[in-house]
Amino acid sequence: MIRVMSFNIRYGLAGDGENHWHNRRHLALARIHAFAPDLLGLQECRDDAQADFVRSNLPDYRFFGVHRQGPGDTALEMAPLLFRRDAFELLDSGCFWLSETPEVAGSRSWDSAYPRTVSWARLASRSSGAGLTYINTHFDYVPAAIDGNARCLRRWLESLPRHTPLIVTGDFNAGKESEVYRLLTGDGRLIDTFRQVHPHGGDEATFHAFGRQGERAAIDWILVSSHFRVVKAGIDRFHAGRLFPSDHYPITAVLDWQAGRD
């Protein structure tokens, strides 16, 4: 089994009052420990005291993230991926930018508000030797850029051998009725883990703006290739009164290899 979590932890310098990172960081960490993922994709993790807190409190994980760059102090934001050292061996890793020149660090296109990155790692299971590619990202929020981000990611995925097992986590800043969702899941190469377990939808919202009902949106997804069977999928809506782990709920999935796939 492979336990996967995607979690936008909200950048640590945001002026969130009682839900400031300093107040909720231990609650965010507790939700990670509660699920104990083998693969963890974070979004809005700044490479300052915030990332230091994550690294120091998750010593059993390998942390890989690259600054998105660009102007101002938002350049330190990352979309890092983490994996359990005892579960996977790292074979290769890298980063590219969601732009028309993805190899150019800090590049952006389609009038995006910020540079956006994709972190990826090629991993081998220490127990079985089975290989997979794990991808984590955070799309922009400008509509034209969201579409461009999706097309850029899709082109990169299509450059991989068709037989490559894929696990993709991210904050896609788009709902499941969007063209972005269709671009990434429409041809069947990637499936939505939550929809596999909950085919009739229901409450899929992950973004909630610290408990504001009118702001809710299903923009965080875990997508996987057909190499995997989705055993469980859920959204962790735990909060302590008015204190939330983040303005997004973590989304989780438990995967198994399909019979005959390794």
Image (tube, rainbow, N blue to C red):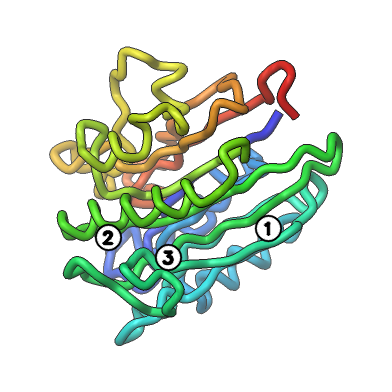
Q: Which mark is residue 58?
A: 1
Q: Is residue 163 left or right of residue 139?
A: right
Residue sticking out furthest to the top: 200
Q: Secondary structure at mark 2?
A: loop
Q: Amino acid at mark 2?
A: Asp
Q: Is residue 53 left or right of residue 97?
A: right
Q: Nearer the viewer, residue 139 or 96?
A: 96
Question: Which picture quadrant has residue 77?
Answer: bottom left
Q: Secondary structure at mark 3?
A: strand
Q: Earlier in the sequence, mark 3 or mark 1?
A: 1
Residue 130 percent across, percent down from the top left: 77, 37
Q: Which residue is mark 2?
A: 140
Which residue is located at x 47 percent, y 76 percent? 67
Which mark lies nearer to you, 2 or 1? 2
Q: Is residue 210 left or right of residue 158?
A: left
Check the image and report above or below for 31 versus 1.
below
Question: Which picture quadrant has residue 213?
Answer: top left
